[in-house]
Amino acid sequence: MKNSFKYLLIISLLAFAVSCAEDDDDDKKTPTDTSTNYYPLASGSYWVYSRAEVDAEGNVGTPTYEREEVDMEEVVAGHNTTKVNTYESDAPNNFGSEASASNNYYNDNGKVYASISFVEQLLTVEALGITIPLNTEINFIKLIDVNATSWDVIEIPFNDLPLEFNGMNINFTGTAKLKAKYLGEKAYSNTTLSLNGNVAAFEYAFEITGDVKLSFVDAGTITVKSTVERWYMKDIGMVKRSDSAVNVTGTGTVASFIDALGKFPATNYELNSYSVASVSN
């Protein structure tokens, strides 16, 4: 995904998170099948996704590819986790040996938790001169729970958070939120892989809103919103992901800056190939 200040603001603020609710459900449902294995983490498993950007006019760009590969088991923050590496390529069968990202996961009674680094990678960007330290006290976020309607993943208040972008000093005061929602079951078909059936769909919604100061002078307000939708098929894993275009609005000088940034694309991921070594609930 191409770089933009809007994406960077989301990643930077969430990476600086100072609180995290791992298992505080807003709305509980009656438990169903907690053994359903929506993310098989067996050694040797891998998933390859085609990734394409879609512009505001609906034009689909040339696809690139991501490979997620189970690496090893390791204990992190007292949890027995599985490490999964991500590799990127312009071709579906030509991945290098150096991972672009790594995350740890563990399954707790049908719920799947991901290491906090997953938050940074929900929207993938390169740094553009903004450096925000990651709060290492936060270890895991809840990624999958088919027995909860919704839950708060992260809610972070900020007061004069200093940022630097292209030599400009920016201070942000406001709130960043990440919420998860179980959208229920949806029908899924992948003719290339002969997959047909229901999937569990989840939405992860970002919202950042607050005041911006430029060199300690009020520059207006900003609101940033984006959603990521991920579909998981039982015993296979994630089969589809859709990243919405980031919606940014503002007032004052901020509004002028947003207008100059222009429009940014959405991104779609589709399962291209996979191998699940074995299934364990």
Image: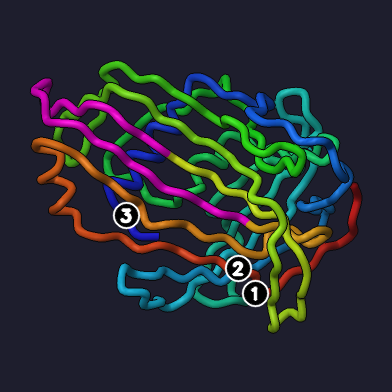
* Residue occupying image coordinates x 60% and y 68%: 49
Kindly identify the amino acid type of the residue bearing the numbered disc 3: Asn
Compared to 162, does 147 lie above or below?
A: below
Q: Left of 234 or right of it: where is 51?
A: left
Kindly identify which residue carries mark 1.
272
- Cα separation, mark 1 vs mark 2, equals 5 Å
Task: Identify residue type, mark 1.
Answer: Asn
Q: Answer with left or right where residue 262 lies relative to residue 246.
A: left
Q: Are marks 1 and 2 in contact (CB under 8 Å)?
A: yes
Q: Would you name the residue on which mark 2 appears? A: 49
Of helix, strand and loop, which one carries label 2? strand
Considering only order in the chain, which callout, 3 or 1, is on the residue closer to the N terminus? 3
- What residue did someone put label 3 on? 3
Mark 3 element type:
loop
Please report whichever mark, 1 or 2, sits nearer to the chain's N-terminal start.
2
**From mark 3 to mark 2, how far is it between C-alphas?**
20 Å
Q: Which residues are magenta?
A: 207-230
Q: Position of residue 216 (x, y in %)?
A: 12, 20
> In the rendered image, which quarter contains the N terminus?
bottom left
- Left or right: 267 in relation to 25: left
